[in-house]
Amino acid sequence: MFEEAKKKYSAAGVDVEAALEKLKNVSISLHCWQGDDVRGFDTDPNKPLTGGIQTTGNYPGRARTPDELMADIDKVISLVPGKPKMNLHASYAIFEDGEWADRDKLEPKHFAKWVKFCKERGLGCDFNPTFFSHPKCDPLTLSSPNEETRKFWIEHGKACIRISNYLAEELGQPCVMNIWTGDGFKDIPGDRINPRIRYRESIDAILSEPYDFKKVKPCVESKVFGIGVESYTMGSSEFALLYAAVNQDKCIPLMDNGHYHPTEVVSDKIPALLTFFKEIALHVTRPVRWDSDHVVLFDDETKEIAREIVRCGGLEGRVNIALDYFDASINRISAWTTGYRNFQKALLFALLQPVDELKKLQDEQKFSALMVAQEELKTLPFGEIWAEFCKRNDAPLDGAWFPLVEEYEKNVLSKRN
Ligand code: RNT
Ligand code: ZN
């Protein structure tokens, strides 16, 4: 069936073998925070999540310790084709022998266990300072009018650059370090510019920590609003894009597709940004009416995002892809695995498009033919190619992995409560 499918794609001008080869080497960052509802290990696990984000649901079996989280990540890795890259938040520091360090004092050694984990599995690792769910959020962080608060969070950011550098050096792969804060206001601000000026100065201060931009890639992630910060955010889209644009020698912009007005699409923003930036970063998620961080599906916008990544040369090192969602209402391993496999599917779907031919039809203004070609590509036997990709990369096929999750739930997750 694969051979038959391949013939059909070939007739449409697509080289299936090249697509399979290409996708094999794409590593998508796997966010550790789906496994424990974004709680981390450095503060009280029963504290509420703050900073304009929220998990909802109380499905049993969340990871409560580093060992449990690592075991769950291993399960996910066994269920997806190819090799992911890890993506950690600073709040996932692992303290040993009763030691504890506050976020401004975090050190590389607090991530030594993660380095060991990644090394044993041959994975790279991305990183994120954690500017939320912490008593020092007043509730603002980098844009706070309180100098002591700002200083604390700047020190946290700098510590995270040192940790990112450690991850990059130890694992031999660049570390994308994303700066996102939930700073903003619930209601109409009385002053919009000064918080943004402070935010800018604080990011400047963080990035004054020395690093090699080839190894540590700081990003600024924008967001239009969050829970409790519905009216205004310091890190709006214009703010973050302009920050990255005037600091192209030391940071890159990050777009999360849950962070825009509902009719805006990140797929269209990718080529816009790549017209000006050498490199960009993405958080792939699924907003349902708002930034709800639902599991990534194989839906139209996800496919369109993947198409733009492929067409813009994003897989040649220009687009850093990370997943970012957290659903606490369903089995978390299935959430992770579904989203990861779906984004791989979207990339494969994109790689199975006759890019040059579609471009030619457009340039020659053959818009009827372009529409027909794009529509007919949708019903080619994609499932056969995806199955072959799973087979060649030692991952279970669709239909075969979920029973393994159910078994893991029965034997491992259900014993956690
Ligand atoms: C929140 C941002 C941010 C977080 C993670 C946990 O809206 O998307 O990226 O989800 O850092
Ligand atoms: Zn995000």
Image (cartoon, rainbow, N blue to C red):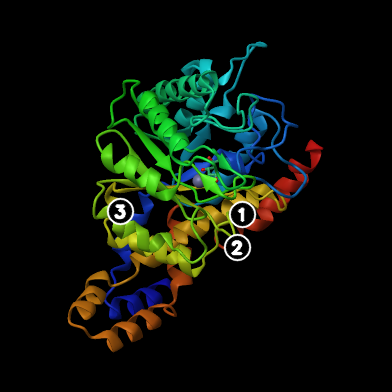
Q: Where does the image place residue 30, in percent across and percent down from the top left? A: 50, 43
Q: Sequence order check: which comes first, mark 3 or mark 1?
A: 3
Q: Are marks 1 and 2 in contact (CB under 8 Å)?
A: yes
Q: Where does the image place residue 67, in percent across and percent down from the top left? A: 65, 29
User: Looking at the rendering, which quadrant does residue 354 occupy?
Assistant: bottom left
User: Looking at the rendering, which quadrant does residue 77 occupy?
Assistant: top right
Disc 2 is placed on an element classified as loop
Residue drawn 60% across the image and 61% down it: 288
Q: Which residue is mark 2?
A: 289
The numbered mark at residue 292 is 1
Q: Sequence order check: which comes first, mark 3 or mark 2?
A: 3
Q: Is residue 190 left or right of residue 28?
A: right
The numbered mark at residue 273 is 3
As drawn, 368 above or below 185: below
Q: Amino acid at mark 1?
A: Ser
Q: Where does the image place residue 361, in percent across and percent down from the top left? A: 22, 80
Q: Amino acid at mark 3?
A: Leu
Q: How far apart are the alpha carbons under marks 3 and 1? A: 24 Å
Q: How far apart are the alpha carbons under marks 1 and 2? A: 7 Å
Pointer 1: residues within 10 angstroms few (<14), some, or many (20+)? many
Q: Quadrant of the C terminus?
A: top right
